[in-house]
Amino acid sequence: MEDWRKNKLAFMVFMGPATFWLLVFFTIPVVAIWVYSFGERGPLGQTYLAFSFDNYLRAIEPIHLKILWKSIWIGGLSTFLCLLIGFPVALGIAFAPDRWKNPLLLVVVLPFFTNMLIRTFAWIVVLGSRGVVNSGLGWLHGQADWLLGFAGLPDVMGQFTPLEMLHNNYTVIVGLVYVHLPFLILPLYATLEKLDRSYLEASLDLGAGQWRTFFSVLAPLAMPGIVTGCLLVFILSMGNFLVPDRLGGTDSMMIGNLIAQEFSKARDWPFGAALSFVIMYPVFIFFAINALMMRRRERVRAEA
């Protein structure tokens, strides 16, 4: 049977529309923003095309590097928590009976049916001073106060003070984990679903315990899904501006908020473009190194 990839006509029919879409709606806009990153801002917010590294030099000033570093550790912590929560979920779905897999996957992707803005505001309803959590704690406080009063110890509990759970970096991390968790579960599930379970059985039969089998066999075999999911979550977390803007406080600005501010309020598109590519350059380098390593592995396998 002829390989369709060697048939130029078939290749154009199948790959032409996708290539055109990526070229027009991804490559050209990214190149345009890259060109803008070397431009200059006019006095009224215009963008003058030039070739200057001033925007990049401004992007690595200490005040901006501080925001970038905070975005990195918030994104890294969010990614770690997503992996900590998402791995057992993906593993449970992959090893679940066939009749339960689709319903469980539907539960994972169900939040995507709701706008992210609404999902973010839902956390305000949950964690606000008059939200669900504080209302529940207030009710428990009232019941405890009633019981102590019934036991002859009135006014021991005092007045209930709502907890301040919003407008801080920890709430931002909670929101980022909630929003991006499916992006880690789905690629990890796709890897675990194709896993040859005979390796796990062989490890257990040879005397390895559950934990050793997990870390020595399962985790390495699932590494492609782990890397893909973690990379997706980390990039999306660093670039997210809605969650820090709604759930964070004055000290919760991330690089995504700064970029959005430069493109909107400040009307400084060249600087905003330079900030965007300060994040994108390492991503491009990572993908290039990963592609070279995969090509080298394939070459070694072919020679073997």
Image: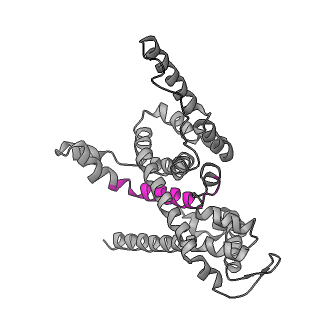
Q: Position of residue 168 (x, y in %)?
A: 55, 51
Q: Is residue 35 left or right of residue 78?
A: right
Q: Position of residue 194 (x, y in %)?
A: 42, 48
What residue is shown at x 61% (from left), y 51% (from top)? 243
Q: Position of residue 55 (x, y in %)?
A: 65, 80
Q: Is residue 21 left or right of residue 198?
A: right
What residue is shown at x 47% (from left), y 61% (from top)? 73
- Depth check: give the residue in front, 14 or 34: 34
- Asked which quadrant contains residue 67, the reply is bottom right
Count of numbered labels shown in the rendering: 0
What residue is shown at x 56% (from left), y 32% (from top)? 134
Q: Position of residue 173 (x, y in %)?
A: 52, 51
Q: Is residue 91 above or below residue 64?
A: above
- Depth check: give the residue in front, 65 or 85: 65
Task: Tell me the magenta residue range.
Answer: 220-242
- Depth check: give the residue in front, 55 or 149: 149
Q: Is residue 33 above or below residue 212?
A: below
Q: Is residue 235 left or right of residue 151?
A: right
For residue 232: magenta? yes
- Depth check: give the residue in front, 184 or 169: 169
Q: Quadrant of the C terminus?
A: bottom left
- Asked which quadrant contains residue 107, the reply is top right
Q: How is the image coloured?
A: one colour
Main SS of residues in magenta: helix
For residue 183: magenta? no
What residue is shown at x 73% (from left), y 73% (from top)? 269
User: Given the current orientation, which residue lies at the most extreme right position?
Assistant: 44
